[in-house]
Amino acid sequence: MFDIVNLIIIPLFATIVVRIVGLKYRNITFHITLFSLLLVLFIATFNLFNIDVVSYVMGGFSAYKGIELVGSKFSYALISAITLAALLSLINSSAVIDRHFNLKKVNYYSLYLLAMSGFIGLCLTNDLFNLYVFLEVTSLSSYALLSLGNKRSYLSSFNYLLIGSVGASFYLLSIGYLYSITGSLNFTEVSNIIINLDSSIIKNIAFAFFIVGIFIKMAVFPFHFWLPNSYHYAINPVSSLFASVGTKVSAFIFIKILLGIYGITFITQNYDLHLLLEILVSLAIIFGGCFALIQNRIKRLITYIIVIEIGYIVAGMIIGTDLSIKASMYHIISDVFITLGLFLFVTILSFIVSDKHTVNLNYSQLYQCFKKSKLASWGFIIIMLVVIGLPPTPGFISKWLLLTSAYSAESYIIFGSLIFSSIVTVVIFFRILESMLFKTEFSNELTVRKVNFSMVLPLYVVIFILAILSIYSNELFENVINPFIERI
Amino acid sequence: MIYLSLLFIIPIAQIIFINIPKLSKANIEFITICSTIFTFISAVLLANNFYAISGKEFVLLETIGNLRFSLFLDKAGLVFILLASFLWIFASLFSFGYMNSTGEKDLHKFYSFFALSIMLTFGIALSANLLTFYLFYESLSLATFPLVTHYRNDDAKAGGRKYLTYLFGSSLILSLPALVIIYLNGGNSSFALGGIESLELMPSLVVICAIFGFSKSALFPFHSWLPNAMVAPTPVSSLLHAVAVVKAGVFGIIRVVGFVFGFDYINSMSFFGISLSLILVIIASISVLYPSLVALSANNLKRRLAFSTISQLAYISIGAFLLSKVSIIAALLHIVMHALSKIILFFVAGGIYVTTGIKYISDLKGMGRKSPFLFIAFIIGSFGVVGLPISGGFYSKFLLLSSTINSNYPILIWVFLLSSVFSSIYLFQVPFIAFQKNNDFQVNKKLPFSIFISILLVCIASVLIFFFADQVYYFLMGFNEEF
């Protein structure tokens, strides 16, 4: 009924519409954005429940020459999740944008939509080069959006631009190498050809370039340094969009290429590579935890929590058993909402304590927040419970599956780092709990504003979705994740 | 099934109702007491329909990797539920008087978390496998944290920090890895007396981690959170830190030893050449004797009671570590008997604090003559803790002693006797000091009626249990035949 290409076309088209309409009527741009994202959400959820794997060929060229889009249940689920995340942070942010960036509003919304069409394209595309194009589309709009904020945000966004471009170039090089040995850019064809090339050195080089490029985009440990800065200094709505959507979509690309082209045995059967990646991902989790622990500022703390969560997703892939791959795919979807919830709370918190759009949020402000908005604080506590993995939240389900599969696959390094990160997140959680309940000497210095219910509502929508993800986890595994893995 | 869910629905309904904004104090108290009574009634109904419900498993959530959360009812769980719901009534009654006379605000929060904690305790009693147990166990630590730190001052902060550090630290470092290993070796099926059948052989370190991960049981190296948690208001100390939380810890030990690993499994294990059960018994003996010695020197009444609790909890752990069915039943009985008598002691400590503001034992001189009721109640409670006749504690201790003689370690009888001597000294010292002559002593306030009635009723209950203990014993004995 709905071609999957609509999912990309609608936001892309709306980008242009917003730009043109915005010349004259600036105030309806928000509504256009909202409407187009709602439409995408509707189509994606409709597809999720009604159709299975669909292939769409752009412009009618045959799949192996032209660009092919493939929609599977998992990509519909991910698109629904990221569109919902974008919608919620859009609703949550409209007040901030109206207040502080009224003149830049048109650009903001058009870039927002452009980024979304890029993200959706990344989820759907079945073509290596097309994937690069969408990667650049999202990256370019994210550089522009992340530079909204205080003065530091220009610098950190520029920093991200440099690193992101390096990452994209590595990815491009990897495509080049793959094309040189397979002569194709289509995922399916490349994987068919590459399976017969047992030990081609070029195949390994392409993999190395790919891993480095995608790890930069995903912010896995040694390449994570751009993420905390650029997300911390950007304004809240932007960081909440890119934090909840960007890294997760990159993780999906990682899974798609690792499983779809190389096959999981490529890393599990190569002892040295497997060990290297195991150490890398364990370091990612451990260092993410350590850095999160020493932060005093809430938003920066949350950016390091993202580093840990990305570590979980990669760890599931590296362990490489059936269960752990499923766990990491499940964690991609649940992590979209976990991160979104955390950032929505940051938006509320900065609204409560300050009039300005960027503010340093300390632990001591949590006390004010707890006094002023019980609902928001409880929402934050519930989301943090998911982060620490209290059973039976989605955080627990994925962490438990990772722990059991790490132990049974004898990846004791990952097992240890998972335990370590659990302890670290629990310590952070207690620190948050303590600063909410107990007054400190800094607590009374700030002017405090009251939040209205409409700001808190998105937070509870997120909690509701996390509950759904936990209750229907079995259906999700059976009907969405399992077919995806079996097909590849 | 309906009675099972009532145990969760009633406290949740209570929490929702008492959080209605601008509810008067009388209404909050009315809703709370109704909820406690209804909960107890549904627990009794559960007991009446026990044979219809027991043995069935109610799956809450099931997903891939055999990850399953489910509830079931067995005799051990039922006894725990009856105990917790019964004492909840009196603890609520007591807290009405206590919280009013100390002028507490935010009562709806206090009662909400109280109800939540009790609900999670029911969940612990009903858990059908280790994962579900872990769920409720961790949630209970979190739900009791606002209660422990109720006063929000520096002491509360320090106590709360220690509370969470010990409980979560041990469960993450020790329990979680052990849980993963047990689960992977076939331990994901339901609890069964005598151990899960399909369990493969694991290193004995796993058993040690699994047991010591339950630091709510306050076994020796992990006991010091309990005295610090006494910064909480006395109703919290009385119900949670004498009944619900700490008993959840020892209940976990009983579940792990008796229902996951089984006696033969642990008997066959050794740790660096020493029999595992010997190590466990030695550590438990240390935690019987060492806190008794500390309690002798503690001048703060609640602190003394806390150390006494640690020592009595170790009795229950020894009951589990003796690895026989009689000793496990003795341990379960001791959970009941100790709870019934320890709650009196805490109530009395609260009553003393409310009427005079005294926290230290040395200040009590002369109080016994002014308010004899409190100290007679204290003596009745002490009888139970020491294990003298006319109180239920006599039976459970007697059973523990007799199972000690039949076990491999008859020397434990001296541990029990020595600690009984200690406990009778440090407990009876309190009324002894109080009944001394001191004409200057002034009682500032009258004892609130609700505190009086709750102490009286629990005293009656703890004497009555002496005459009906055989009922509980035979009920529990039956649980051998069933499995």
Image: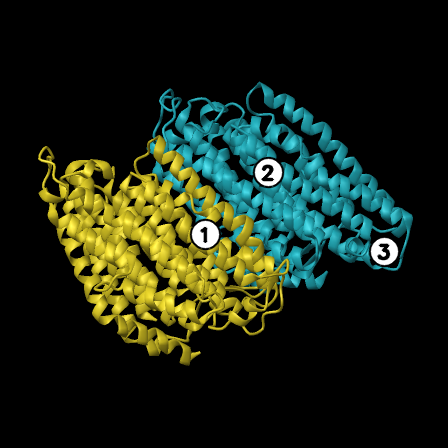
Which numbered mark, 3 or 2, is in the foreground of this view? 2
Reading the chain from its start, which is encountered first: label 3 or label 2? 3
Task: Tell me how far mark 3 sits from mark 1, CA to CA.
Answer: 65 Å
Chain that bears disc 1: B
> Which residue carries the number 2 mark?
A289
Closest to the observer, A159 or B8 = B8
Task: Tell me how far mark 3 sits from mark 2, CA to CA.
Answer: 38 Å
Badges 2 and 1, same chain: no
Q: Residue at x 35, y 73 (%)?
A: B476
Tag 3 secondary structure? helix
Q: Is residue B25 left or right of residue A41?
A: left
Residue type of the residue flagged with mark 1: Ile
> Which residue carries the number 1 mark?
B286
Question: Could you tell me residue A351's position as x and y percent?
Answer: 42, 28
Task: Tell me how far mark 2 sits from mark 1, CA to CA.
Answer: 37 Å
Question: Could you tell me residue B464's position as x and y percent?
Answer: 19, 66
What quarter of the picture does the N terminus of chain B occupy? bottom left
Q: Residue at x 63, y 33 (%)?
A: A227
Which mark, residue A194? 3
Question: Could you tell me residue A411's position as x and y percent?
Answer: 70, 53
Chain represented in cyan: A
Query: Tags 3 and 1 in contact by the CB under 8 Å rule?
Result: no
Q: Is residue B389 left or right of residue A361?
A: left
Residue type of the residue flagged with mark 3: Ile
Chain that bears disc 3: A
